[in-house]
Image: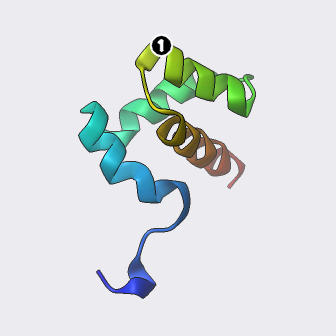
Amino acid sequence: MPAENKVKGPASYFPSIEKTYGRPISHWLEVLDGLKGKKHMEMVSVLKSEHKIGHGHANALVAYHLARGKA
């Protein structure tokens, strides 16, 4: 993939997240949809504690989810 087309930001973690946890990104975004009203780190904590997602991956999912909601 040419450098100018390289995915940047939180979405750059998506292939690794799907491979590591065996679920599509849409699944994790639906989980986060169910956590409306929670703050960023509260959402990260839920992904880590209830779904055993690593901190970096959880943070990337939450950051993407919140940014998408503001678009």
Where is residue 22 shown, x and y percent of the image?
24, 33
Report if residue 23 is visible in the image: no
| Image position of 19 (left or right of 40) | left
Label 1 Cα neighbours within 10 Å, binned few <14 / some 14-19 / many ≥20? few
The vertical placement of 52 against 5, above or below, is above
Where is residue 18 shown, x and y percent of the image?
30, 42
Q: Nearer the viewer, residue 41 or 38?
A: 41
Quadrant where the C terminus sits is bottom right
| Residue at x-position 61% and y-position 50% | 68
| Residue at x-position 24% and y-position 42% | 19
| Image position of 18 (left or right of 62) | left
The vertical placement of 56 against 14, above or below, is above
Quadrant where the N terminus sits is bottom left
Q: Secondary structure at mark 1?
A: helix
Q: Which residue is mark 1?
A: 50
Badge 1 amino acid: Glu
The quarter of the displayed image where residue 24 is located: top left
